[in-house]
Image (cartoon, rainbow, N blue to C red):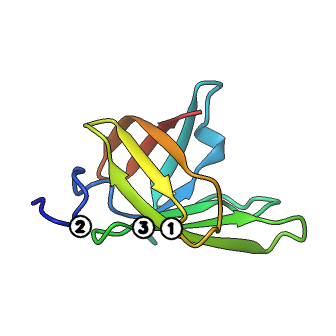
Amino acid sequence: MTGPGRPEAPPDVTGSWVHAFEEDTPAETVYRRADPDHPFPPARRPRRRIEFRPDGTYTERRPARDDRLNEARGRWEARGADRIAVTFPDGGGSPFTLTVLSRTPGRLVLAR
């Protein structure tokens, strides 16, 4: 389902994702779907969270120095089958592109 203002991406990319840093590799950053059925082990630092909404809204929550999560809101747009462009029209951050290496309903793997 694409159309004006609708990003072209598989539905399994949309949703809320939590950084599963225990699963990272030197080349991959791994996220798991934010799901109460997949509890994360305790961590000494807060976990980064990203959200891709179907309307193109992007939200990122990153740990700050004081261990609270700082939130940045922007827009996302699919660029082909494996790239996602993220922008921050309100100046909340610098634009960047994510490369999707693999995705399943519960796991999203991005290139570092």
Q: Amino acid at mark 3?
A: Asp
Residue carrying label 3:
37
Location of residue 84 in the rendering, given as x and y in whole percent from the top left corner:
39, 46
Q: Residue at x 48, y 41 (%)?
A: 98
Q: Quadrant of the N terminus?
A: bottom left
> In the shown orientation, is residue 49 left or right of residue 42?
left
Q: State which tag comes first along the sequence, 2 or 3.
A: 2
Q: Residue at x 27, y 54 (%)?
A: 12
Pick the residue in front: 35 or 27. 27
Secondary structure beneath dot 2 equals loop
Residue carrying label 1:
74
Q: CA distance from mark 2 to mark 3?
A: 32 Å
Nearest to viewer (mark 2 / mark 3): 2
Location of residue 26 in the rendering, given as x and y in whole percent from the top left corner:
65, 25
Q: Residue at x 79, y 74 (%)?
A: 68
Q: Quadrant of the C terminus?
A: top right
Pick the residue in front: 12 or 44. 12
Residue carrying label 2:
5
Q: Quadrant of residue 77?
A: bottom left
Q: CA distance from mark 2 to mark 1?
A: 14 Å
> In the shown orientation, is residue 7 left or right of residue 28?
left
